[in-house]
């Protein structure tokens, strides 16, 4: 009879929350097993997604819609069991997008090779260089005859569009692999390759195929002979060159590494576009050509570098393919520069006189060569003086931080109030879990008491069942479970940190009650503690003076002093020549002022491998 009673009890509904959770989990797993891929994707698409994740999920959606049978390997959402997750769908979508990009790139490569114009010339033998140089000279002679005064404002007698292909975009490390030029009156373009490499079979270059890859058997020119042929023209200031390099000034840097200097660089189509329209969405050559090409005869698709080669150097790609792309670049660059020149020349000011071209000719046309000279020259830094300033400012910064604590009375009461506000969600979750824990304790306690009472009533206190229930009851009653309310919830934040943006936002907007004006600086944003927003507050809010003092010392130390010295765990920005090198940007700020950014290429620590014991 006891066995029958036990069996019945096992099948009765239970109020134990742990059992209920297990039953719910089992139901969820069953539902997940029955969920179709399309249903899983719909569920994921309703979640909060970044733009990258949203694109991947949409790709899976489209692929599933096209599938007529079972999902292909490209859209397999999960290899094992369990519910499909957001990560599963995003990973599948990114595989689909990658496959699509590979197919599209292959189609573009084939189309580019098939439609190569007759006036695009790629040199493959050193013996072709003299004829090329003669064509270059002929272009200059014709321009001096047919356009005798066209470029007079720029101080040059002729103009061509030029470009270098390289191993990368680091102006101090990467080297050129080819040179292209567009000759406008002769209506022909040239690509001269001298640094392509065969990378087939190498790890990371599996994407190369016979159509797109450079092969070691493919003919190209000798670097030294090419440089000897092109440097006399490129270093001649009387004959103008246009580039689309903007703030990078890449091509001028490349020439210096190759042993000569480019002069006569009087047109930079990126800088010129900034002067014509500082609000362009993009100042890249291809976006500008796609947008304005109809005004200067460029129609049809305009492929970017990434469209053709992805995010990598063109060095391992076919000379023929890179040549067509490079010549199109200088053709686009020429057409854009020519159009910009005419737009500036015809732009009328309030008094009716066209001054925009004068401004560009007198100032901006001189900047590319000036900027590169400044960048490569660098600046000598007084390290001893900076070290003294660091020693002076560090204790002042610590004092300023202490003043923040005392000025705003930041103590246990402040921290608790901040924690309650910033972690309201966590506290709500804790209270709910605590309620469940109290309920489980109450149910379990009642269960043990029932067992004890039954055993005592039956005179069976010697049974193991009774002694176990007594022991378990003692454990349950000894559990110290706090009440399920906000007062007893733990602190999730135990101290205030001035470097924590959430803590700082609470201090500014909640504790001090500063009116939130973030929207004036960052559209759609609220409660910002970004440096530009704070700087505006510091000028207007006297209550923020203690914070402004901290910010001033932090900026001096972290922006100007410590990066130079390589202190406080930072790597020194001083290069191996003992100087600081900056890249200058004439349109680097929203107001049009000059800006500069430090060189952030190869770490100078790499040179330590060449040290000897004597050098150490």
Image (spheres, rainbow, N blue to C red):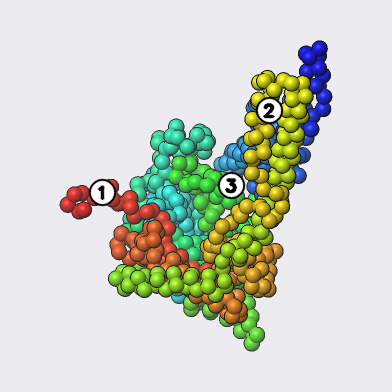
Numbered disc in front, either 1 or 2: 2
Instruction: Find residue 125 and report its horizontal and vertical position in percent.
Output: 39, 44
Closer to the camera: disc 3 or disc 2?
2
Q: From the top left corner, tell me how far across and down residue 470 is, in percent.
A: 67, 29
Q: Is residue 536 left or right of residue 375?
A: right
Task: Please tell me which residue lies in front, 115 or 92.
Answer: 92
The answer to which of 407 and 49 lies nearer the viewer is: 407
Residue at mark 2: 469
Q: Residue furthest bottom?
A: 351
Q: CA distance from mark 3 to mark 1?
A: 40 Å
Q: Nearer the viewer, mark 3 or mark 1?
A: 1
Q: Is residue 236 visible?
A: no
> Which dot marks residue 610?
1
Question: 227 left or right of 323?
Answer: left
Q: Position of residue 342 (x, y in %)?
A: 60, 71
Identify the disc placed on residue 307: 3
Disc 3 crowd, CA 10 A, few/some/many (<14, 14-19, 20+)? some
- The answer to whether residue 156 is left or right of residue 15 is left
| Residue 410 at least partly seen | yes
3 or 1: tag closer to the N-terminus: 3
First in sequence: mark 3 vs mark 2: 3
| Residue pictured at 80% horizontal, 22% vertical | 9
């Amino acid at each position: 009879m006891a066995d029958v009673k036990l069996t019945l009890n096992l099948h009765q509904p239970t109020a134990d929350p742990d059992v209920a959770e297990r039953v719910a989990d089992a139901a969820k797993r069953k539902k997940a097993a029955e969920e179709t891929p399309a249903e899983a994707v719909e569920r994921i698409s309703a979640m909060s997604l970044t733009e990258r994740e949203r694109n991947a999920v949409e790709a899976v959606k489209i692929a599933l819609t096209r599938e007529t049978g079972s999902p292909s390997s490209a859209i397999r959402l999960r290899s094992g069991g369990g519910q499909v997750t957001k990560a599963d769908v995003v990973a599948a979508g990114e595989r689909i997008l990658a496959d699509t990009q590979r197919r599209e790139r292959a189609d573009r490569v084939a189309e580019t090779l098939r439609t190569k114009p007759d006036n695009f010339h790629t040199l493959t033998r050193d013996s072709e260089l003299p004829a090329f140089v003669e064509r270059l000279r002929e272009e200059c002679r014709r321009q001096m005859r047919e356009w005798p005064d066209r470029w007079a404002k720029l101080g040059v007698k002729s103009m061509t569009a030029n470009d270098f292909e390289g191993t990368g975009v680091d102006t101090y490390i990467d080297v050129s692999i080819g040179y292209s030029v567009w000759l406008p009156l002769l209506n022909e373009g040239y690509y001269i390759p001298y640094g392509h490499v065969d990378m087939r079979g190498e790890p990371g270059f599996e994407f190369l195929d016979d159509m797109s890859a450079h092969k070691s058997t493919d003919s190209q020119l000798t670097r030294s002979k090419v440089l000897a042929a092109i440097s006399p023209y490129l270093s001649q200031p009387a004959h103008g060159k246009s580039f689309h390099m903007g703030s990078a000034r890449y091509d001028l840097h490349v020439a210096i590494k190759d042993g000569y200097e480019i002069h006569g660089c009087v047109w930079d189509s990126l800088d010129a576009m900034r002067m014509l329209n500082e609000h362009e969405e993009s100042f890249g050559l291809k976006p500008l050509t796609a947008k304005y090409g109809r005004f200067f005869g460029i129609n049809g698709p305009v492929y970017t570098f990434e469209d053709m080669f992805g995010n990598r150097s063109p060095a391992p790609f076919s000379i023929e393919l890179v040549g067509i792309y490079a010549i199109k670049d200088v053709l686009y660059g020429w057409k854009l520069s020519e159009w910009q020149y005419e737009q500036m020349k015809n732009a009328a000011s309030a008094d009716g006189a066209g001054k925009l071209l004068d401004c560009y000719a007198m100032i901006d046309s001189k900047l590319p060569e000036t900027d590169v000279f400044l960048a490569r020259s660098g600046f000598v830094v007084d390290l001893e003086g900076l070290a003294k300033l660091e020693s002076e400012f560090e204790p002042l910064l610590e004092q300023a931080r202490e003043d923040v604590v005392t000025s705003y009375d930041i103590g246990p009461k402040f921290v608790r109030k901040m924690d309650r506000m910033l972690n309201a969600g966590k506290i709500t979750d804790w209270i709910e879990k605590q309620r469940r824990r109290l309920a489980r304790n109450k149910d379990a306690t009642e269960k043990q008491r029932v067992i004890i009472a039954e055993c005592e009533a039956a005179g069976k206190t010697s049974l193991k069942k009774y002694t176990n229930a007594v022991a378990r009851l003692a454990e349950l009653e000894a559990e110290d479970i706090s009440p399920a309310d906000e007062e007893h919830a733990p602190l999730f934040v135990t101290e205030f940190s001035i470097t924590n943006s959430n803590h700082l936002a609470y201090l500014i907007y909640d504790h001090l009650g500063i009116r939130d004006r973030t929207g004036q600086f960052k559209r759609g944003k609220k409660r910002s503690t970004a440096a530009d927003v704070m700087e505006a507050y510091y000028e207007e809010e006297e209550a923020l003076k203690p914070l402004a003092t901290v910010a001033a010392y932090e900026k001096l130390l972290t922006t100007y002093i410590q990066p130079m010295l390589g202190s406080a765990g930072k790597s020194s920005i001083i290069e191996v020549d003992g100087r600081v090198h900056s890249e200058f940007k004439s349109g680097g700020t929203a107001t049009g002022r000059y800006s500069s950014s430090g060189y952030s290429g190869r770490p100078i620590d790499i040179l330590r491998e060449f040290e000897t014991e004597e050098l150490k």
